[in-house]
Image (cartoon, rainbow, N blue to C red):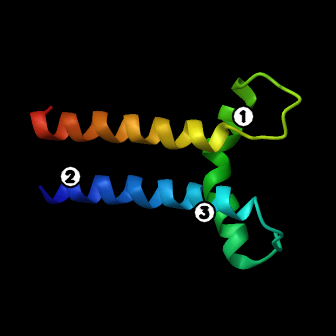
Amino acid sequence: MTLIMLVRSAFDVYSWIIIARILMSWVPHNPNHPVMRFIYEVTEPLLAPIRNLMPRTSMPIDFSPIIAVLLLNLVQRLIIGLLISGI
């Protein structure tokens, strides 16, 4: 059960970091601040490929973080399901 809790916690923390990035995009911030650099460095490896797969639109909204959180949730459920079933 401990491994399941660890997996769940890791995915939850990563999802919250993505949500923090979404919220920070709505307010002026210093991209060179150490916390902001950390958030971008941790989330960009997941968001960049999603952004590249999405069609370019004229809308100023980046949907890649939302898709990333949904994908993380799906992968989390799959991994936990496999751990519970013993595979």
Q: Amino acid at mark 2?
A: Ile
Mark 1 or mark 2: name the one nearer the start of the chain.
2
The residue under the point 69% across, 59% down is: 40
Q: Amino acid at mark 1?
A: Arg
Q: Residue furthest right?
A: 58
In this image, 56 relative to 12: left or right?
right
x and y, in percent, of residue 79 in the image: 28, 38
Q: Is residue 86 visible?
A: no
Q: Is residue 30 visible?
A: yes
Q: Residue 51 got which mark? A: 1
Q: Nearer the viewer, residue 58 or 39?
A: 58
Above or below 81: residue 22: below
- 10 Å crowding of disc 3: few (<14), some (14-19), many (20+): few
Mark 1 or mark 3: name the one nearer the start of the chain.
3
Q: Which residue is mark 2?
A: 4
Q: Amino acid at mark 3?
A: Ala
Q: Nearer the viewer, residue 86 or 78?
A: 78
Instruction: Write down the quadrant of residue 34 in the picture.
Output: bottom right
x and y, in percent, of residue 42 in the image: 61, 58
**Badge nearest the viewer, 2 or 3:** 3
Instruction: Write down the quadrant of residue 1 in the picture.
Output: bottom left
The Cα atoms of the two marked residues, 1 and 2, are separated by 30 Å
The residue under the point 66% across, 55% down is: 22
- Badge count: 3
In this image, 4 relative to 30: left or right?
left
The residue under the point 57% across, 36% down is: 67
- 10 Å crowding of disc 2: few (<14), some (14-19), many (20+): some
Q: Nearer the viewer, residue 86 or 19?
A: 19
